[in-house]
Image: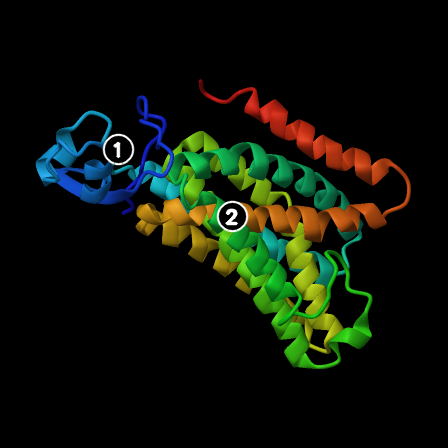
Amino acid sequence: MGLFLDRDRGPAVAAESGASYRIEHCKAGARSTVRMVRTPAEMSRRDPSLKSSHANQFHHPGTVLMMAALNAPRFWLALVLGLSAGLTDYLGGYLLVRRSPSARALRYFVALGAGFMLAAAILEMLPEAFRLNNHWAAPLVLAGYVGVHLLEHSLVPHFHFGEETHHHEFLSAGRSYSVLLGLATHTFFDGIAIGSGFVLSSWLGWMLFVAVFLHKLPEGFTVASVMLAGGQGRQAALNSSLFLGATTLLGVLAINLRPGWVMAGLPLSAGVTMYVAATDLVPEVNREPGIRMALVFFCGVLLFFVLRAFAPA
C-alpha cells in the first residue's frame, strides 16, 4: 500500500520560499498518516525562540505541509492508469508490426499530445513543483530537461517520433537498443509524473495521465519502427514496446511506494515532459506541411483548458 500526501482533503499549507521539510509517518490504531514537517534547523532559522524538539515541529502552526490517511483506492487507480498507459505503448508497436492502416493517424496523436503535454507541464506541473519544493524545484526541472537532452545527443542516435525512415543509422542492433534505453528513460518519468499527480490529488493525477496517454501510441510505434529498422524481428519490436510499458508502470509504482520522492520526482518529470513535448514532438509537428497539424497542436492546448475548467476549487 502507498502513503499519499493529499491536496483534496482540506486546505494544505503552502511551502514558503526556501523551506526545508521531511516526511514523517505516523500510526494511530489502524489509521496510517504521513506528514511533511519542517526540519529542526529550518524551524530554528525561522524562529530562534522555538525549541527544535519533535513536539514543537509536530504541533507548531504551519509546520504540517500536507497530511492524509492511507488511500488504497487512489493507490490502485494510479497503478491501473499506469498499466493502461503502458499497454498503449504496446498497442502502438502492434499497429506498426501489423501494418494497420490506422497507424497513419498516429501523427495526429503526436500533435495533440505535444500541445496537451506542454500546457500541463507549464501550467500544472511547474506550479505544483515550486509549491512543494521552492528551493530545489528550478534546479531539478533543469536537470530533468538537460539530462534527457544529454542522453539523446550522446548515447542515443537521432530518431524521429513515427515510422523510422533513416535505416542507415540503425545498421547495428546496439544502436536500436540504445534508442530503446533513451525512450525507456522517457517512459519511466511518464510513470513518475502520473504517480506524483495522484500523490497530490486525484484531479492532477488524471490530468497528467491524459498528458502521458496522448503520446503513448506514437511512442510505442516509434520504438517498434526503430527495432525493425535495425534488423530486429517483429517479436523483438513488440517486446521493445512492451518494455516501455513496463518502465511506465515502474515509475508509477516507485512514487506510490515512496510518496516523499514526489518533492524531487515532480520537478524532474516536469523537466522531462517539457523536453519531450518541445524538443521531440513539436519538431515532428513542424515537419508536416500545411496548417492542419498546427491546428491539432493548438487543439491539444485547448483540450487542456477545457479539462482544467472542471478542476475542483
Instruction: Say what amino acid the circle numbered 2 marks.
Output: Val
Q: Residue at x 62, y 40 (%)?
A: 117
- Residue 246: % across, % down: 49, 60
- Residue 70: % across, % down: 25, 38
Of residues 2 and 73, which is closer to you in this image?
Answer: 2
Circle 2: element type: helix
- Residue 177: % across, % down: 62, 73
Instruction: Say what amino acid the circle numbered 1 marks.
Output: Ala
Q: Residue at x 74, y 37 (%)?
A: 297
Circle 1: element type: strand
**Is residue 270 depicted above or below 148 in this figure?**
above
Q: Are marks 2 and 1 in contact (CB under 8 Å)?
A: no
Instruction: Spot the residue most to the front.
Output: 48
**Which residue has dot 2 on it?**
141
Q: Residues within 10 Å of mark 2 (few under 14, many from 20)?
A: many
Q: Is 104 left or right of 136, judged from the image as shown?
A: right
**Which residue has dot 1 on it?**
68
| Nearer mark to the viewer, of 2 and 1 | 2
Which of the numbered marks, if any, corresponds to residue 185?
A: none
**Is residue 116 depicted above or below 238 in this figure?**
above
- Residue 301: % across, % down: 68, 32
